[in-house]
Image (tube, rainbow, N blue to C red):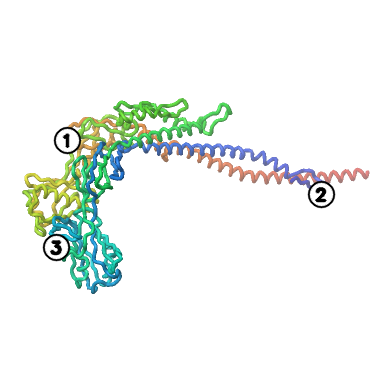
Amino acid sequence: MATTSTTATGTSSLDVNSIVTQLMTVERQPIAKLNTREASYQAKLSAFGSVKGAVSGFQSALQGLNSPGKFNTLKATPSDATVVSASATSIAVAGTYSLDVTSLSQAQKLVATGQTSSTAAISDGVATTVTFDFGAISGGTLTAGVYSGATFASNGSGTKSITIDSSNNSLQGIRDAINSARIGVTATIVNDGTAAPYRLVLASDNNGVSNSLKITTSGGDGTIDALMAHDPAGLAAAQHLNQTVTAQNAVFKVNGISVSKTSNTVSDVIQGVTFTLNKEAATANLTVARDTAGIISSISSFVKAYNDLAATLKNVSAYDSSTKQAATLQGDSTVRTLQAQLRGMLSTPVAGASGALTTLADIGITAQRDGSLALNQAKLDSAIASNFSDVASLFTSVGKATDSLVSFNNATTATKAGSYAVNITQIATQGKLSGGSAAVTNIQAGVNDALSFSVNGISASVVLTANPSYTATTLAAELQSRLNSVTALANAGISVAVTQTTGVLTITSTQYGSSSSVTITGGNGATDLLGIPTQDNGVDVAGSIGGASATGSGQILSAANGDPQGLSILINDGTTGARGTLNYSQGYASTLSKWSASMLAGDGPLTSATNGINSTIKDIGKRRSDLETRLIGVEKRYRAQFTALDGMLTNMNQTSIYLTQQLAKL
């Protein structure tokens, strides 16, 4: 608001506030320019954020094409999903498999005599040990849930025990003791509505004929024994439980070959395929084929993501001639570099490609005048149907060897495309233990049925099923089955193969390399089965790739330096010496994935550009702050100067009035 200075005898018309305000408006013009400049850089920062987002989205779309495993995906499709369901891995073999299901596997169920109460004490509370053994019931007859003339053979998994005493000697207490022990048996109580309605039901947790139950007791007053002791090989009086469901295996045929399995879910019959049987007395076909629909979807996603990226780069850098307006990053060198690099990579044939398809145009992906890509779906479908391996080579990193026993395993970002000679100086071997004499085939419980081993450094102890009539072949199969059922080995992914030659057993680790070994560490059957054995530890493959030194781990040979650095190959047996060449190519998805990663890296061009902008914005902020501080002083100085001038003018007015008055008196 304008003000006017006044005095008792005169006035001044000088408006100090207005003058200072107008002067400060001029003084603040550099700050206004800084604000405008800052807004421009903030807009650039936002535009680069959009570019980063588009590059990140493009990178994500490439993941569906960047791994060789994506092109090895297979799917298993049943002709009737009510009969079987299935899945397949990359090691499955494409084809159609017929399934003829006779019966499904099921677990044995046993029922105890009814009790009038589920909570009342059953015994006198003196500790009774209840022992559960799992095995197969064979022979004899089953009448009204009771066996006659049958035999029971333990499956060798070991017995499990619980204790029933005064703390848990009710029907509910027995049920809870069994379930909390997690011994492979589930106990429930069923009320059948009779005068003594509460009946204990025991079910084996595992299906199959080899998981039937034999239950023995010791100690106590005999009440627990009368309730649940059960020996299917004994007299009827020794079978206190009634069998309501008989354990059975899944019995079926695959391509006419009869198979019996303890579980309805099977993963070791058809290579790379896991299937679950759902219906018995039924047939179905299982077709294993490449998941081409997934690949086509990934390629379509790649084209869309590229077009989104290209559109973003164009939008942030274009010039609109009709409005004569330039986009925020028009002329920016970073954006121009990105556009040029993308066009260059997509127009260049795949480095190292040796197949019929070397460019995206070969599968129907072509560049348009506006910089986008167009997809000819029919041409892509045809290429996938007729030349799938070359389509894979167009996108992912692929290695093709001239030697059928040499295969590509992996590569790193350091690996360069090219053709590399493979030379092997040592073939990888498996650790094995060979018997020193023919094995004794009469296996007796507690005499020569126990063996302890160390396989690849993991301890494993087994108990063989007693049998006086083994052949060397069936004994080898029994030992292999027992060892491969050891939990510690299975958890470590370790298995063995047991073979026999003229009665002499050989136990071989399925793993290759220096960590592969089989050692006998004890057991009452060690001498009878293996005599004085010979131990041969495995060795790693050794050699070179493309003339560069390489390190071996099992059957995998990896280049340590040079152009093939990071390239690893699998040598599946064969001879030492020259083993042909491996041609390694880097497809578009592989190359573009590396490019995307480099663009988004902490030291990449996009980060460098945004760091530069942020630095400039920070500098603008500092300069503005410095100017604001200086202008505070400028305003104070102006105000002091014009206030003093106002006072001077007031005094001059007063003097003028005085002189006028004096002159008037003359």
Residue 548's place in the image compared with 512, above or below, is above
Q: Mark 3 touching mark 2, by CB under 8 A?
A: no
Q: Earlier in the sequence, mark 1 or mark 3?
A: 3
Closer to the camera in the image, 235 or 64:
235
Give the CA separation, mark 3 to mark 2: 132 Å
Give the CA separation, mark 1 to mark 3: 57 Å
Q: Earlier in the sequence, mark 3 or mark 2?
A: 2
In the image, is 116 to the left or to the right of 662?
left
Indicate the amino acid at tag 1.
Gly
* Helix, strand or loop under label 1: loop
Give the residue number, with chain letter if any, for mark 3.
Answer: 234
Indicate the amino acid at tag 2.
Thr
Give the residue number, with chain letter if any, for mark 2.
Answer: 7
The image position of residue 42, as x and y in percent, is 54, 39
Give the residue number, with chain letter if any, for mark 1.
Answer: 574
* Helix, strand or loop under label 3: loop
Q: Nearer the viewer, mark 2 or mark 1?
A: 1
Residue drawn at (14%, 50%) of the image: 478
- Can the viewer see residue 494 in this picture? no
Indicate the amino acid at tag 3.
Gly
Closer to the camera in the image, 238 or 477:
238
